[in-house]
Image (spheres, grey):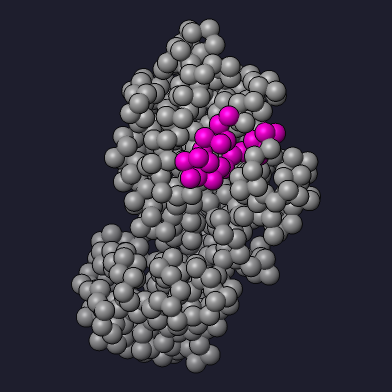
């Protein structure tokens, strides 16, 4: 049944706010045109979701979101439906992730070139519905979508979050919970920091002690943990269903104490150090002149590449203070071709540029100044950059001096700081055309569970999502803080333990 039109004079439902939900979407769309006559689409109990061939997965995902709160069956069908997901009927300017959304009293249509675009449109549709649609139990409704049209596509191709599962281990279910949360804001990559001094978190069958011993602890001496290869494949699959690509990181040649503790032969003196549960950095290094180092890394990268369908392997490369610069260059001159021979592109922290990787490599800038000669020189050669300046984008930095979690070595990052920079115009000598995108890392020295992740990620994650997706012309702090406040009821329904920043006019 087609939804009934709701006249503009109708009483607002209990989640309406001062402005139409059509104008409160995060990330801000390219174009929003609320219907000048008002009105809305109303989802009824006998509604259906139409999904084109190739869009069935997105339709099932949408139904999975809507069924618990509405209590409706919402069958997904190839016949006409109240919500329609259509492929291949939009202009080329939308690219692979753009979409058009039209809502009227007759229904909602989302059109895109690809399933990725339809999925992005579905995330917008969620925000156009009342916040209680996110509940996992049946709610009263009504389930209305304001009438109007949205045309939308991303500014940057790469819009990422990073989760450090090495300092503290997070279970597969905790990782999946975070995947669901970042998907809501059109994040399309999740970078997993899988190995560090404090723990090795991925099963490598040819070197089993990496996980069973190297993964047996964490910061503070907790039990740690690791992902079996089947668990990792399942995380990759779960992310892919939400149009998110996993980028795995094995940090090297430093940040390697867990590996060195697991296998004595990887150490230059043949003596395994003890497992490490502190948070200091820069003291460990693989043995650059031992041939077994490269056999070890060849096996690790081969197994990880086989598990990871995405195009990138992240090789770390940061804070290798125990490795001389000549040895660092020598090391990566061996390792970079090994990764590329597996059919993967290389990503790494911008320190990796000391080894002059190929132009297909993507350095990730994590510095705290708007100038870096290594990055500018790489861009001049043709490399693209992912922007993650630590004093702007690191979500493990405290909001202020009273924040109970996080660190502050790169400074405090309140919401206005997170939102108040331009990834396309931040580094000198790096034009917007050389910026692949933006990523918000979340290091876990002080984080132990999902509540901790959420407290540090929200409300800042939506700021980074908007920097990565929305055209710069939409960038406006006052608009953003108002739209961010309107997300709070949605987060409450989702059980997200967010930080109530005093900068945001949260609803009572």
The residue drawn where x is 54% and y is 16% is 290
Q: Main secondary structure of the magenta part?
A: helix
The residue positioned 48% from the left and 28% from the top of the image is 297
Whole-percent x, y for residue 299 in the image: 42, 29
Q: Quadrant of residue 232?
A: top left
Dividing the picture into quadrants, the one containing residue 315 is: top right
- Closer to the camera in the image, 4 or 203: 203
From the viewer's side, name the closer residue of 367 and 295.
295
Specify whether residue 429 is in view.
yes
* Residue 258 visible in image: no
The boundaries of the magenta stretch are 334-355
Is residue 441 magenta-colored? no
The N terminus lies in quadrant: bottom left
Image location (x, y in percent) of residue 131: 40, 66
Relative vertical location of residue 28 with respect to residue 404 in this rendering, above or below: below
Q: Is residue 336 magenta?
A: yes
The residue sitting at 28% across, 66% down in the picture is 60
């Amino acid at each position: 049944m087609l939804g009934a039109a709701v006249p503009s004079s109708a009483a607002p439902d209990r989640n309406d706010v001062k402005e139409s939900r059509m104008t409160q979407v995060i990330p801000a769309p390219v174009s929003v045109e609320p219907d000048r006559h008002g009105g809305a689409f109303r989802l009824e109990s006998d509604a259906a979701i139409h999904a084109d061939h190739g869009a069935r997965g997105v339709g099932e995902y949408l139904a999975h979101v809507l069924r618990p709160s509405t209590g409706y069956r919402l069958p997904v069908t190839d016949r006409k439906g109240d919500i329609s997901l259509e492929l291949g009927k939009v202009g080329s300017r939308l690219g692979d992730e753009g979409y058009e959304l039209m809502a009227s009293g007759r229904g909602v249509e989302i059109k895109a070139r690809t399933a990725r675009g339809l999925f992005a449109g579905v995330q917008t549709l969620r925000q156009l519905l009342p916040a209680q649609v996110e509940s996992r139990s049946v709610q009263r409704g009504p389930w209305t979508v304001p009438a109007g049209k949205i045309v939308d596509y991303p500014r940057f191709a790469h819009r990422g979050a990073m989760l450090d599962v090495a300092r503290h281990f997070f279970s597969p279910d905790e990782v999946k919970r975070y995947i669901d949360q970042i998907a809501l804001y059109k994040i399309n990559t999740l970078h997993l920091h899988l190995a560090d001094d404090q723990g090795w978190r991925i099963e490598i069958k040819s070197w089993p002690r990496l996980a069973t011993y190297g993964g047996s602890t964490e910061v503070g001496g907790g039990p740690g943990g690791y992902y079996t290869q089947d668990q990792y494949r399942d995380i990759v699959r779960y992310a892919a269903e939400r149009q998110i690509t996993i980028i795995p990181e094995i940090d090297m040649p430093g940040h390697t104490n867990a590996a060195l503790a697991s296998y004595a032969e990887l150490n230059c003196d043949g003596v395994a150090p003890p497992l490490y549960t502190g948070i200091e950095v820069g003291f460990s290094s693989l043995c650059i002149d031992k041939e077994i180092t490269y056999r070890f890394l060849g096996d690790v990268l081969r197994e990880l590449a086989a598990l990871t369908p995405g195009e990138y392997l992240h090789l770390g490369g940061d804070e290798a203070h125990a490795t001389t610069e000549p040895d660092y260059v020598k090391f990566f001159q061996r390792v970079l071709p090994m990764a590329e021979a597996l059919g993967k592109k290389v990503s790494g922290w911008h320190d990796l540029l000391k080894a002059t990787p190929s132009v297909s490599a993507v350095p990730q800038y994590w510095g705290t100044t708007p100038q870096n000669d290594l990055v500018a020189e790489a861009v001049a050669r043709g490399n693209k950059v992912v922007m993650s300046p630590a004093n702007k984008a690191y979500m493990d930095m405290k909001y202020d001096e009273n924040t109970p979690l996080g660190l502050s070595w790169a400074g405090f990052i309140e919401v206005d700081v997170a939102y108040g920079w331009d990834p396309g115009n931040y580094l000198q000598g790096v034009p917007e055309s050389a910026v692949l995108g933006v990523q918000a890392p979340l290091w876990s020295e002080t984080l132990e569970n999902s509540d901790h992740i959420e407290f540090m990620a929200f409300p800042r994650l939506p700021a980074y999502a908007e920097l990565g997706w929305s055209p710069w012309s939409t960038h406006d702090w006052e608009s953003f803080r108002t739209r961010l406040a309107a997300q709070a009821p949605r987060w409450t329904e989702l059980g997200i333990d967010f930080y109530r920043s005093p900068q945001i006019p949260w609803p009572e």
